[in-house]
Image (cartoon, rainbow, N blue to C red):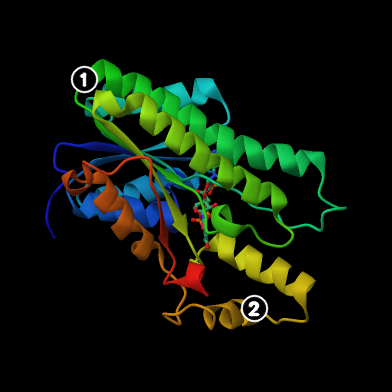
């Protein structure tokens, strides 16, 4: 595989598992130095696994809703790896509830992680990239739900629509600094989050057994398969590469064509 990111440092929130870890593996394979962040101790094991593949990698406990922890995360990139070149705001949470049952606490937590957390990381990354003066790439994980919403997740859909808005606004503000800001909309991707969705939506939408709802939705995907983390990682690696230098403020679907069905 090409080593397009040799000498570059990438920060990935939610990088210990699922889509984020697949991104970390892709950047490791392409020569980047990697800082992954999450709230569970598993982040250290994930970083160790990247190091065992030969990558320079650090795992940092960081709640993206806390500005002090976010600053400390980017300090690791600066102190250990000479700065940040690529920042991927990927941490996210979801809950599923009927509108009358959705609590304010769920609404606030979802907005806080999925939208405010993305903003705080973008803000800190931009501050550092501007000071470094060598440009940079920001990529934010939105969702197919940022295109047309979905039943029982108004808070999640709103939080991801918010990611698209802040992506476009920031892209305009930092364009002359050589910094691009883009977002991605994964469709149905096999991760722990999807296991939760399958279980809870499956119960609420009908009498589905484990995996059955997922399989029925996969039939709506023109490519007739769920996505894997590496499908998303390929798009993110492109957006982080020089080949995407003239792409900014965009939100790109990676969903096997699901948006069309
Ligand atoms: P996972 O549930 O597998 O991973 C979520 C990640 O976010 C974990 O690393 C988790 O850390 C981290 N995280 C949660 N809260 C915080 C927080 N406060 N601070 C820092 N990290 C946090 O989900 P996926 O890999 O599936 O999802 C990754 C992103 O992709 C999310 O933004 C999600 O909304 C989005 N997405 C996923 C889709 C799918 O089908 N899977 C579809 C569309 C979008 P920890 O493990 O430590 O809790």
Mark 2 crowdedness (10 Å alpha carbons): few <14, some 14-19, many ≥20: many
Please name the residue shown 66% across and 61% down the image.
Answer: 150
Residue 177 horizontal side relative to residue 231, left or right: left
Compared to 123, does 213 lie above or below? below
Q: Position of residue 110 (x, y in %)?
A: 66, 42
Q: Give the residue displayed 64% in from the left and 65% down from the top.
A: 197
Circle nearer the N terminus (2, 1): 1
> Which residue is pictured at 71% across the width and 74% down the height?
202
Which one is in front, 48 or 210?
210
Q: Is residue 184 left or right of residue 163?
A: left
Query: Which numbered dot is residue 260?
Result: none
Viewer-proximal residue among 45 and 118 = 118
**Label 1, residues with CA under 10 Å away: few <14, some 14-19, many ≥20:** few
Where 16 falls versus 60 (above or below)?
below
Q: Which mark is residue 213?
A: 2
Name the secondary structure under disc 2: helix
Spot occupied by residue 154 in the image (x, y as percentages of width and height): 71, 51
Residue 25 x, y percent position in the rendering: 30, 55
| CB at disc 2 and ligand 1 closer than 8 Å | no
Q: Quadrant of the N terminus?
A: bottom left
Whether residue 144 is visible, yes or no, is yes
Q: Are dots 2 and 1 in contact, CB under 8 Å?
A: no
Spatial separation of the CA atoms under disc 2 and disc 1: 48 Å
The residue lying furthest to the right in this view is 100
The answer to whether residue 105 is above or below residue 151 is above
Q: Which mark is residue 133?
A: 1
Task: Say if disc 1 is inside 8 Å of ligand 1.
Answer: no
Percent position of residue 57, x then y: 29, 41
Furthest residue to the top?
131
Q: Is residue 62 visible?
A: no
Q: Secondary structure at mark 1?
A: loop
Disc 2 or disc 1, which is closer to the eye? Answer: 1
């Amino acid at each position: 595989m090409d080593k397009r990111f040799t000498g570059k440092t990438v920060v990935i929130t939610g990088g210990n598992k699922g889509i984020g870890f697949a991104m970390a593996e892709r950047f490791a394979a392409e020569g980047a130095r990697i800082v992954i962040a999450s709230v569970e101790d598993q982040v250290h094991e994930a970083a160790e696994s990247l190091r065992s593949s030969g990558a320079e990698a650090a795992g940092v406990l960081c709640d993206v809703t806390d500005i002090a922890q976010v600053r400390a995360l980017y300090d690791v990139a600066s102190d250990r790896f000479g700065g940040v070149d690529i920042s991927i705001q990927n941490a996210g949470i979801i809950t599923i509830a009927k509108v009358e049952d959705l609590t304010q606490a769920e609404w606030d937590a979802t907005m806080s992680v999925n939208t405010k957390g993305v903003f705080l990381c973008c803000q800190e990354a931009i501050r550092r990239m501007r000071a470094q003066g060598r440009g940079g790439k920001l990529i934010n994980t939105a969702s197919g739900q940022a295109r047309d919403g979905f039943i029982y997740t108004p808070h999640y859909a709103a939080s991801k629509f918010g990611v698209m808005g802040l992506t476009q606004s920031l892209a305009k503000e930092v364009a002359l600094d050589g910094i691009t800001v883009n977002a991605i909309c994964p469709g149905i991707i096999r991760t722990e989050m999807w296991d939760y969705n399958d279980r809870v939506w499956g119960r609420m939408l009908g009498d589905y057994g484990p995996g059955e709802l997922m399989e029925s939705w996969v039939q709506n995907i023109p490519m007739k398969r769920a996505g894997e983390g590496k499908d998303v990682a390929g798009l993110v690696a492109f957006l982080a590469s020089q080949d995407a230098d003239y792409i900014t403020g965009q939100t790109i679907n990676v969903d096997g064509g699901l948006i069309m069905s």
